[in-house]
Amino acid sequence: MNQAEKVQAIGRLADKINRAKVAVLINFQGLNVEKVNMLRRELKKVSSELVVTKNTLLERASRGTNFELLISYLHGPTGVTFGYLDVVTPVKVLAKFQKDSAGLGIKAAILGTKVLSPAELKDLSNLPSREVLLRNLLALFKTTQLSLVNVLMATPRGLAAVLEGLRKKKETSSQA
């Protein structure tokens, strides 16, 4: 790789680092090409990607970003999974793939300014997806509004019931 190609590769990596909401460093040494490609396809389905590059290029691309916190993990064969839209879904894909396929190791991840250990990533993978969380939040808002309407309507309903009772009582007393 000549100098111009290195500069282009560093620029592409820096762009990916800046766009990613989460980046996970993995060790893929025990995976064959077929499994790596399968992992890439699964990640692509969730708007994520797996990039395999030289550690030195990744280190240079990360300068001046939060990704710099992961430089100490850049040793040996390293792949980076970039999650662009969602934080949880790519981590779920990696956790499922790790469970199903021996040979994938998770080194660390960066989420904002926090470095996450493999154990913290496992906890993150157990969270519901963004869509499920949004659906639950919407349902909570809807039930809260309905409850509020019911509470606010209880007093007028009670008053109406009392007035109706008085009306019936007056009717029965005037008939007698």
Image (cartoon, rainbow, N blue to C red):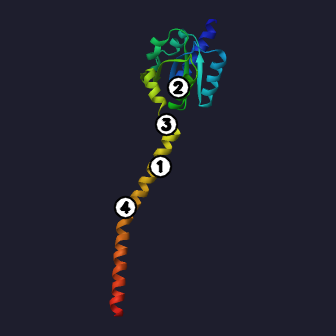
Q: Residue furthest right?
A: 34
Q: Nearer the viewer, mark 4 or mark 3?
A: 3
Return the x and y of residue 71 as percentages of the image width and height: 46, 13
Q: Is residue 111 visible?
A: no
Residue for badge 2: 95
Q: Are the residues flagged by discs 4 and 2 in contact, CB closer than 8 Å?
A: no
Mark with earlier residue (4, 3): 3
Return the x and y of residue 100 as percentages of the image width and height: 57, 24
**Does 114 appear above or below 143?**
above
Camera-nearest residue between 163 and 12: 163
Q: Residue furthest bottom?
A: 176
Q: Nearer the viewer, mark 3 or mark 1?
A: 3
Q: Residue furthest top?
A: 2
Q: Are the residues flagged by discs 4 and 3 in contact, CB closer than 8 Å?
A: no
Where is the N terminus found, in terms of image quarters? top right
Residue for badge 4: 151
Mark with earlier residue (2, 1): 2
Residue for badge 1: 139
